[in-house]
Image (cartoon, rainbow, N blue to C red):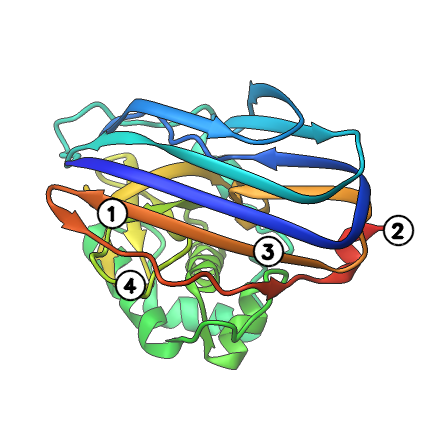
Amino acid sequence: MLLHIRHETLYRYDRPAKHSVQSLRLTPRTETGQRVLAWNLTAPGRQSQQIDAHGNLMHLLTLDEPHEEIHITVAGAVETEEVTDSAPADRGRLSPLVYVPDTELTHADEALLEFAARHGVKQPGRNEVMRLAHAIRDSMDYVSGATEVSDTAARAFSLGRGVCQDHAHVMIACCRALGVPARYVSGYLLTGRDDHIASHAWVDVWLAEPERWFAIDVTNGVPGSVQHCRLAVGRDYLDACPVRGVRRGGGAETMSAKVEVSGDGLQRRPATPRPRLLQQHAAQQ
């Protein structure tokens, strides 16, 4: 499938920020099942790029002059295809064992440990991964705004609701509790609907047989498909989030995002972006 993608992110500050540094993981990965045909990133300030430890292309954006907003736009075309067992396994730059230890965001508390033991297995195949994902989906309603970006898997699970980031973190926490490697994936999803106006998140789980990563979209209860475009992978959201930064000054901050994805004649019209007040402690006054 040929996916056409456009993603705009706008940060606004109530007074000028003196200095900002943003880490951008906004360029799709080139790997088995996915090929970038064209991609362009537009943003103010100085840019440099590097490949991070997880194999993601990261742009470092630096603004040294006072500024009241940062407008970041990426757009391009990505070709995706179904990945079969006969295709070369994309093992990544790091051993799957790197994705077994938990992180602060994916630490399993007693409730998650019990849930994982009840619904998961230590050497899962595709069917076992799907069953665990469906159990999580049945236990956690998708409710936009129910959680904060800093909330842990345990917190979201205890609430019984969250967004795709929370579903992914809970899935990762359950897998790691069983000793199964699992990693966070950020990217885009072609839906054909107006209700998905942001980037998406899902999970790669390491299968015992065949030995390869298996992508599972917990929020939608489906395996990864040609409608998924992969941006970045990591141990959790913090490793793979599309935009992450720090600044000095600027006061309160609002962020709005708009994503448009089309492919094979299926077009999704973006809804009006809704500003979101971010936590003010993210700014260094």
Please state which amino acid type lies under the numbered disc 4: Asp
Q: Nearer the viewer, residue 97 or 246?
A: 246
Report helix, strand or loop for mark 3: strand
Residue lying at the far right of the rendered structure: 285
Q: Where is residue 31 in the image (x, y as percent from the top left)?
A: 31, 25
Report helix, strand or loop for mark 2: loop
Please state which amino acid type lies under the numbered disc 3: Met
Rendering quarter of residue 128: bottom left
- Report crowding for label 1: few under 14, some 14 to 19, many 20 or more residues within 10 A (C-alpha): many
Label 4 and label 1: CA atoms lie apart by 20 Å
User: Where is 118 relative to 251, above or below?
Assistant: below
Q: Residue at label 4?
A: 194
User: Where is 21 relative to 138, above or below?
Assistant: above
Q: Is residue 268 left or right of residue 253?
A: left
Disc 3 to disc 1: CB gap under 8 Å: no
Q: Where is residue 218 in the image (x, y as percent from the top left)?
A: 33, 60
Which disc is residue 285 wearing? Answer: 2
Report helix, strand or loop for mark 1: loop
Which disc is residue 255 wearing? Answer: 3
Going 52% across and 80% down the picture, which residue do you hit?
159
Disc 4 to disc 1: CB gap under 8 Å: no
Label 2 and label 4: CA atoms lie apart by 37 Å
Q: Which of marks 3 and 2 is nearer the N terminus?
A: 3
Q: Where is residue 38 in the image (x, y as percent from the top left)?
A: 31, 23
- Report crowding for label 4: few under 14, some 14 to 19, many 20 or more residues within 10 A (C-alpha): few
